[in-house]
Image: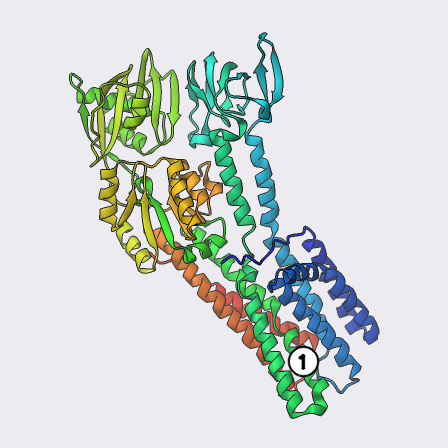
Amino acid sequence: MQNKKLILFAPDSYCLRGWVSVCAGALLLMAYAADLSPTMRLFIVLITFFWGGELFIRGCLLELKNLYVGFNAFALVSAGAAFLFAVLNALREGTGFPVSGAAALMPFIFICANFIKYFELKHIGSSRRFIKSLDAFISKSVFKVQDDGSVKKVFASEVEIGDVLLVKNGERPAVDCKIIKGSTIVDESLLTGNITLAAKQTGDILPAGSVNKGTEVRATAESLKNSSKIARILEEVKKSETKKMLSPSMLELYAGRVLLFFFVFASLQFICGALIEPSKAFHWFLAFLLILALSGPVTYMAAVLLPVFFTVRNARKSGIFIQNGQALNLLRLSDIIFIDKTGTLTSGRLEVASAEPAEGVKAADVLKAAYTAQSSADNIFACALKEYARKNKLSAPKLSSIELHPSFGTVVKEGKNIIIAGRKNWLEDKGIEGLPAAEDVKRTVFYVAKNGKYLGAVYFKDRLRANAKSTISFLKAAGKKICLISGDNNGAVAAAAQMAGIEEYYSAMYPQDKAAKISAASNMGQKTVMLGDGFNDILALLQAGAGVAFSAANNVFSSWVDIIIKDRDFAAFRRVFDFEACRANVIKQNVYISVFVSVFMFWEVLIGGKALAWYENLLAALLTLLIITINSARINHGQRY
């Protein structure tokens, strides 16, 4: 859970401080081996503390101003206590605790802490570079056609709606624009996820972010730079990436509580000892420092981060790609899970059920026209029609123009014929006449028109993904509210919801509607998760606290979501929760192990009177790390249901 008091402190020099600590640790070991004077050893320790631990000092001070105690304080307190214990214990001239080389704990702590923080925070640098790189998708300048017919290069931010632009070969339009002169082919993969080039001619929209792969065309601006479709998507991507970047480190999970435990434990030892033996108050103060020094931030780091590593690795083996580790925690804490229907809750493998032609049209002609419209597309309807064409031996059409509109439909040109296939209301917007007055709300339907004339409708049948109903029951039993959101008609969505056991559902939702629905829930304080399957869900996936996508291949949106599932079984989504439950339990066990070992080491010194040399402390830490590693490796590959 994100702590609002936690501030982002991510300097770039953790790696350098780590190497400083390595050098200081090596010098300190040589000083002990050469039996150098305590003054010389403490001088090396002093350098390590204020240089190797400088970032933790700064981070701790910044967080304390915000009344927050986390991992920076944990590492600093433990290392500082080791330093003070070494100094004060050495001043006792043999009458102190039987611990030699206690100061060596401090560089060891800073070596591990600096390098782990460096690797853990690398994603912040990557996120910053990624956010900056997104600006490259929209050109900073355009070629504007002046009133006198000349062409002038201007900043994209200066473009106004209605301006005439010249879009050359290889250029990305900076704004959405409509072609008024010329024709070309365009790469719209960034927007549609489809690698097929789309043919564009006079009157067609040339979206911002697409790449002109053909001849230059002239077009009028239909949007401003920051209001184009791709600009809105990229802005959501930036917000999502920034949210991930500002997510608290996994090291913050239990750091404050573990430090508090040792501080209270040490304080009680000091108070009780000082009351029982007032003459040995200084001795008990040394015990206080020793407890904090042995509190184990190094083993704590391993206890928290190793389970994350094994979870990500083993989840990948079972077809679950966790791209944001914090998403697991967000899934567990979520209040409401939004689920897309077609391709997510359902198998996404539609089959052609039937065709209902318009008066005077044959059903075979409707199916052939639908196949022609979808032959170059890559969506669930296209797959079903291609399978139908294969079984019925329909030849692949030769198209001269392809225009794909995700979530709406397709426009293609075959010879002199223009075929449009897609949603009913979208065809109405295209000026198609003769469409049915009422839409069949009980089935998934695709409407087809040719040369402006309505041909008929193609009906598809779909089924729930395997184990969808049992997984929904599991989520509801876990206290999650389930909401089905889909662009399909109300009858088809209602039928799928009833089969899956989902009470709340919404139909006829465009991508922006899904995102708005999730945003409204988030504004009400609910923690949200979106489960989708394609680029048409990207706005919703980015808007949610955690985005999970079923995807069989690497699509354009793959790097923009938190978790990718490459398994057709809906139970794979439940396995994500299984991984999180296992990870959370293992982390708790690891923390208990590290605390137990630290307490045991302290009692060995205080009660048993056994001297612990620096190498014994090191061996104890390594043994603890081994136990924690073995325990973390038990995280399995997920249970299939």
For residue 212, above or below residue 550:
above
Q: Circle 1 — which element? A: loop
Q: Residue furthest left?
A: 360
Residue holding disc 1: 612
Q: Does 81 appear above or below 378? A: below
Horizontal and vertical percent position of residue 366: 22, 22
On the image, which quarter does residue 85 sit in?
bottom right
Viewer-proximal residue among 394 and 140: 140
The answer to whether residue 641 is visible is: no
Q: Residue furthest front?
A: 524
Q: Residue at x 55, y 29 (%)?
A: 138
Q: What amino acid does circle 1 point to?
A: Leu
The quarter of the picture where the C terminus appears is bottom left
Residue 638 versus residue 485 in the image, above or below: below
Label 1 CA crowd tier, 10 Å (few <14, some 14–19, many 20+): many
401 up-or-down from 278: above or below: above
Q: Quadrant of residue 576?
A: bottom left
**In front of the other: 281 or 39:** 281
